[in-house]
Image (cartoon, coloured by chain):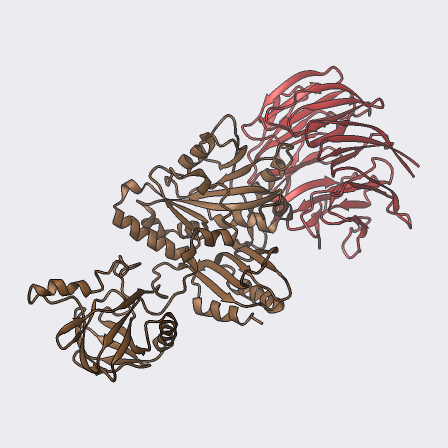
Chain colours: A brown, B red
Amino acid sequence: MSNDTSIPVTVLTGFLGAGKTTLLNRILTEQHGKKLAVIENEFGEVGVDNQLVIQSDEELFEMNNGCICCSVRGDLIRILGRLMKRKDKLDGILIETTGLADPGPVAQTFFSDDEMRTHFRIDGIVTVVDTKHILQHLGDSPEAQKQIAFADVLILNKTDLVSPAELDQLEKRIHKMNSAAKILRAQNADVPLDAVLNVGGFNLSRATELNPAFLEPEYPFEWAGAYPLPTGTHELVIGHCHHDHDENEHECDHDHEEHDHDHEGHEHHHHHGNPDELDVVVMSVKSLDENDLTTARDAAVLTFSDWENKVKDGDTFTPGGTLHRLLLKDGHGHYKLQIPHDGHFLVFEGCGEHPLHIHVAGETVKPDWQKDFQHTHSHEDAVSSVGISEPGELDGKKLNDWIGKLLKEKGGDIYRMKGVLSVKGSNKRLVFQGVHMLFDAKFDREWAGAPRTNTLVFIGKNLDRAALNESFKSCLT
Amino acid sequence: MNLTKHWAAVLDDYVIDLAWSPDGSQLAAASAAGPVTIFKNPEGTKLHELPGHDNGTNCLAWKPSSGSTLATGGQDGKVKLWDAAAGQHTGTNELSKTWIEHLAWRPNGSTLAASAGRELAFLNPDASLRHRFKPAPKTLSALAWQPKGGCLAAAYFGGVCLWDADDFVPQKEFAYGNGIHALVWSPDSKWLVSGNQDPSVHLWVPETDLELNMSGYEGKVKELSYDHTSRWLATGGGKDACLWDCAGAGPEGRDPLMFPHDTKVCAVAFQHSHGILATASQDGVLMLWSPERKQPLRATVKMPSAATKICWSPDDTQLAIGSEKGAVYVLKCED
């Protein structure tokens, strides 16, 4: 992909006022020694003497009865067709879109047209976000959601206009929508240019380099803690400590609300379902060994999909393969946990926001291991990312059928997808990338001893993580 | 059939346009970088190098019938007129802020049509503006005068409009729901054909409003040429040059003739008043065909780089070829 002679193309999107023009001006005036051509929209105001600036209107070619997934940009086909007729090859092309543009057709242009495919390659889609106003746009504009979903690089601009807490919250929300993009913060679009140009964003292995967390799987629970507990009936308390006496201040250290990982992703204090219910699973774990914890975690995932057993304030429940739904009053509840034998017990919480304490004979027990998990259903936006990571080899035919069917049925909702796949019978990695229904797959380098594994990410609307995972697994040999 | 190298020359960049003067005594070749070179034929010597346009020349067109008036359009938004024999710049029209992409002289030489983005204008032979049309709904992608000269066909994404040559009003408008890359009229003015992004060719008989769509191409169709009898329509759009038989009711229901190349066809050109078709492909191969012979392939030559444009001299004895690497070849073609 990088050894070909195709010219890299950077697509710059973002709402009006987000700072696209500022970024573009910086790219053009900075001394980087590159010969760039800029295709700006008809309202563009960039003009720099030593670079080639071409104005263009955003003409859509609807290839297939007005289907948006099949729309390409006619003006780009025309202008790029002319630009490729140059002896002095360009080092890169920047395409600036208007604020309300859907980045889909721009990206599709490079997939649907053979000539474009041969001479150019999308290096990355860069979306500039106005941190002050983006929340409002996300609420009322599908284009804003798409611009975030399509991005390989997201620049949170004008960070000086919002508080650090708001910024963290925004970044988390945006990361949930597009977990494959690299997120940068800037005040005046002042990001290093090598983070914007030549990012290789359409290449998944680069994307994973940039953000190793994006394939982190999601779980039906948000927090788990391991408690050493003796046989007997102990008190399990949900809710903040009562301010009966001063010492409780000290005890509150165990309140996992204080734990710095605890509220990862939950600053906006949303609840999953009813705020007066908390789903928990308690199970015995042999040791705090990684293997034992993993086994217990996987068992808990299954248990969480079970029917729940309702537990009222004051009721008693026992560890094991049952999902307990604790009924709370104003976020508080006291329950009796019956422990059958001495040992470590894992407590999984469906919503990690609730402080949880276990008291043994009046003393609070500290968890000696705890962890936060990324919750499956914590998206407030319809746009989200689904990452799949599955070792093994794929059956080429099954894979083809699967992709074909998926794109036919869901192509409208899948904005971007990228992946590196291991196909039986080939010793090379199959690298694929796509936009809506159009995709491109080619074998690149050999696995050469690296573990053969399949890595994919989908970014889109209303994605069903479980169904995607399951159907993908059926393509394994 | 004998195909021999007659003369050759090299420009500084991609040969973006190429055309013979009406009497065949000069060949104009524009490089993508801007300069326009006038070669003397049959000597092959460089007569003049005209500066062309800043940022690059896009197109050129000789005024038909007589003289040595050459029009050029470029990325500076200007249309320039030149006396090619004298090497003199004779006029400029600063028509637009955007690229001049297409130029076409009315067959009688009275009017020069020029398009830039969505704008279309008619200029007088001295480069002054005669009429500016209202902008097209989308960027104009091809211009073609009806051979009889009564109207200009102007294509954009979404359709083709036939503008009356004298009254500047639309005679007809044909809708077409896709991108159009090229237009050609059959020499008898019966058929108007577009080469399309979708990929297909679309044929209209403007007189009767008949329409045909011929699809099945590998890729977008940008190469179109009619033979002088108006029977054969040659098209690119894949590894075969594809010929549609337009006799009578047209090509519908008839299998096209397929003339194969090893790589994508990038140029097709029929002779002006004889029956030979020249086709060129990305690998630099050029072939000559006689479509109605049992063994249609007449000759093959290979050039070091792909042709960008091929054109027959007015007397059909020479073939000029422009290439991606900037070479201009003139081949002599003898039966």
When asked about the image quadrant of residue A5, the answer is top right
Left or right: B104 as drawn, with respect to A201: right
| Above-or-below relation of B25 to B300 | above
Quadrant the N terminus of chain B occupies: top right
Residue B96 visible from this viewpoint: yes
The image shows residue A253 at horizontal and vertical percentages of 17, 62
x 78%, y 45%: residue: B233
x 19%, y 65%: residue: A254
Q: Which one is nearer the viewer's eye here, A47 or B67? A: A47
The image shows residue B51 at horizontal and vertical percentages of 66, 20
When asked about the image quadrant of residue A278, the answer is bottom left
x 16%, y 80%: residue: A314
Quadrant the C terminus of chain B occupies: top right
When asked about the image quadrant of residue B18, the answer is top right
| Above-or-below relation of B216 to A467 | above
Residue B245 visible from this viewpoint: no
Left or right: A186 as drawn, with respect to B97: left
| Above-or-below relation of B257 to A404 | above
Left or right: B140 as drawn, with respect to B42: left
The image shows residue B172 at horizontal and vertical percentages of 64, 41
x 47%, y 68%: residue: A469
- Given the current orientation, which residue lies at the most extreme bottom position? A340
Q: Which one is nearer the viewer's eye here, B60 or A135? A: A135
